[in-house]
Amino acid sequence: MTDTSTPPSAPADSAPAAADSAAVDETAETKKSESVASDSDLFRQSEIAADYIEGLLDILDYDGDIDELVSAGRPMVEVVGGRLQPLVGQRGATLEALQELTRLAIFRATGSPSRLLLDIGGYRAARRKELAAVARNAVEKVKEHGDPVRLEAMSAFERKCVHDVVNAIPGVQSESEGVEPNRRIVVRVAD
């Protein structure tokens, strides 16, 4: 049988208040160490990904410098060098496939799914700029005519880039519609 009665209250200046303070400090320290461990786990994921990509580059006899980092709470690997376009493919299709294979390698090594972001030859950075222009153009059309604008089908990465730009502009909203691989964004006047 469990005792559910409340203990008698102690005076305000007694030792339990100090114990409560110590418990709060311990909880804060535990959370701090968890976030450090989390950053450590993310960096470990980027290391695993870098090793996997390095092995792939060796097999394909491609040269590239590999940077592993953690950015915005995500592990990232960037491959820089010449002659890497075949690894990006048409509209980033090969890059997306390589990213998924690399995520599987991380899962196999850690047992945890990864949100790794892989970039090759600066493709994602350049594509982000292009998509920002596409999003601003769609917003201008919506504001000018009032009709919804449907954009071409995009990958999840591309859709996120467009949503981020549209959501930062007042008076308009965006939403995704359709099913992969034909999922697209519709930009319309905000409700």
Image (cartoon, rainbow, N blue to C red):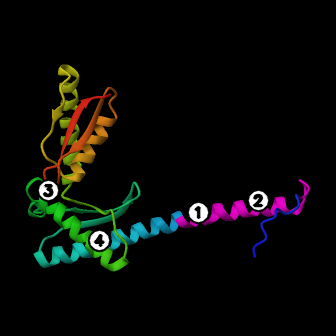
The residue beneath circle 4 is 49
Q: Is tag 4's residue or tag 3's residue first in the polypeptide sequence?
A: 4
Mark 1: amino acid:
Lys
What is the spatial separation of the Cα atoms under label 4 and label 3, in whole angstroms? 18 Å
Give the side of residue 10 with respect to residue 157, left or right: right
Q: CA distance from mark 4 to mark 1?
A: 27 Å
Q: Main secondary structure of the magenta part?
A: helix
- Tell me the magenta residue range: 10-34
State yes or no: discs 4 and 3 in contact (Cβ < 8 Å). Answer: no
Give the spatial CA distance, label 2 vs label 1.
15 Å
Residue 31 — which label? 1
Residue drawn at x 52%, y 65% is 36
Query: Image height check: is 72 above or below 128?
Result: below
Q: Quadrant of the C terminus?
A: top left
Q: CA distance from mark 3 to mark 2?
A: 53 Å
Which residue corresponds to the image point at 23% horizontal and 23% vertical from the top-left?
A: 143
Quick one: label 2, few (<14), some, or many (20+) residues within 10 Å? few
